[in-house]
Image (cartoon, rainbow, N blue to C red):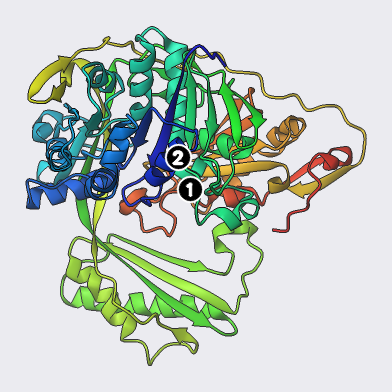
Amino acid sequence: MSNDKIIRIGGASGFWGESDMAVPQFLAAAQNGQPLDYIVFDYLAEITMSIMARARAKNPDMGYATDFVSAVIKPHISAIAEQKIKLISNAGGTNPAACAAAVRAVIADAGLDLTVAVVTGDDLTSRAAEFADCHEMFSGEPFPDPDNIASINAYLGAFPIATALDEGADIVITGRCVDSAVTLGACIHAFGWSGDDLDCLAGGSLAGHILECGPQATGGNFTDWESVADGMDNPGYPIAEIARDGSFIAAKPDGTGGIVNIGTVGEQMLYEIGDPQAYILPDVICDFSNVILQQVGEDRVSVSGATGHAAPDTYKICATYSDGWKLVVPFFFIGMDARKKAESFAANALKRTRAKLRASNAGDFDDVLVELFGDDSHYGAFGQSPDTREAVLKIGVKHRDPKAAMLLLKEATGMGLATPPGLSLFAGSRPKPSPVVRLFSLLVPKSQVPVSVETEDVVHAVTGAPGIRFDPATLSRPAPPALPESREAMTQVPLIQLAWGRSGDKGDKSNIGILPRDRNFAPWIWHALSEDMVRERFAHFLARPDNPGSVERFYLPGTGAINFLLHDILGGGGVASLRNDPQGKSYAQILLAAPVSIPQSLLHLHPEPKAL
């Protein structure tokens, strides 16, 4: 890691609704010898944009992450200004101008002289008619009815943020940009990187990727959760100490909970990526396959080796649109044969509901999903405990009419005295139908998306390099790890004993990243976790389990890790899905139960048994 200049960036938010404890942590850390140059905030996801779009439609002054103003700016702006920390946030959502106005009002009330800049150009909602002939880039579906569109936004990059900082901004507010751009923009400004500094841009983007989910890099959602459980009431939020060459050290404030080690950082590196050699961003196409992670101190991990390809010539565009209504209702059964009782109750509740739908000519449900919890059914054919005495039943339905969806609740609860024994209901408010919001993704040439930076009523157009057409098929793929010859006795252990794992989502896809605890395990894990094996483990979730292309496998030789990309597995994903886990967060846990055969001599490398 180059030491001629270091910038320190803290990641304070991973979603809209994140705890407000990060900024006080960072301000206190600065007083204790860990000063920051920047704090970055990531609030946005596709569903967040649709919620904000509806809020703006009701009130033209809304449509942004209001807690950025109420929980960050109002209570802390004086201390932030005193410590000369710059803030970069995508809190603008669908209304960055209104967010900036609210921030400026607080700054004025505090008697401070700070410059707030706004990046605009991502909002393409008014141009919906231009995309009428487009098809969804993954499914091929036609563009939805423009009357149902909630939002259309381009994923902008980091160079407009850097421009705002170059022009003297103390606070930069954006609408939709890629999550890592808030970090990369600071790096471009601080180090003067150009669009040709591809490896640096890839390293800065990886730093942003580590920071963008807050405490997920410091012990949150960590495979070895028991090792950090006692301190997660006050988890340390991540800090990246970034060098001019794009390498960095991941850390956290001293005296906070959690941990920063190769496992926590490696899991986050693999989180929600597809092809690790082609992680496509607006400013650079990243290759994380040869990244090296090194523990260089307590709660300090060095990250280096990211490389980059030239930026693409398109922006990814995501539209959200309404597609009917859904209702999800939980019930609880206790006693012998709880699973069978729950299944019987669900079948009869749906049967009587459908009878009333037919009688009123309302039409059948568009989709129905019955899920059980407590019977190991989420493990599919590999479940071990079907005869449970406690079961949670979840019935989910979709319908064009919210009243028809609500009818399920009426009929199911109306069966309270005609149910198998052991039904337990949660006392409280009843669920209500909610909109089904679906995602539509496409690519648009960058030349068709003008981007601007507005600083104190001065607007500057931002133009970047046009980019190139990128084809992943041209990449040279690394050789998988060769299985060593071994004539010694073998033993079978669960994958969790050999590896860390983390999973996440992108639309209707899920990824599962597997990071070996020791490089000696990598060949054996690769040999055991074939694409067919993973497809079999998740056949009950995959839309097309017989399609060999439904699971892709990628090798990362720098760490010995594997990334799996599972297609059409989330029932539509996000709020379009009826699944209990519409984002695939549990999938790594399911895969970590799989058996792996290794030579007995390797057990000493990580001997602790894991009971699954």
Quarter assignment of residue 351: bottom left
Q: Quadrant of residue 385?
A: bottom right
304 left or right of 466 in image: right
| 310 is higher (above) or lower (below) than 57 | above
Q: Can the viewer see residue 546?
A: no
Q: Earlier in the sequence, mark 1 or mark 2?
A: 1
Q: Residues within 10 Å of mark 2 (few under 14, many from 20)?
A: many
Q: Residue 605 or 546: which is nearer the viewer?
A: 605
Whole-angstrom CA distance, mark 1 to mark 2, is: 7 Å
- In this rendered view, identify the residue nearer to me: 263 or 612: 263
Residue type at tag 1: Leu
Residue depicted at x 16% and y 36%: 100
Query: Residue at image x 60%, y 47%?
Result: 536
Residue at the farthest right position:
488
Q: Which residue carries the number 2 mark?
A: 567
Report the side of 448 relative to 410 (left or right).
left
Query: Do we see residue 403 in this rendering?
Result: yes
Element type where label 1 sits in the image: loop
Q: Which residue is mark 1?
A: 542
Quadrant where the image shows the N terminus: top right
Query: Where is residue 2 drawn, in percent x and y?
Result: 54, 13
* Count of all numbered marks drawn on residues in the image: 2
- Comparing 493 with 99, the one in front is 99
10 Å crowding of disc 1: few (<14), some (14-19), many (20+): many
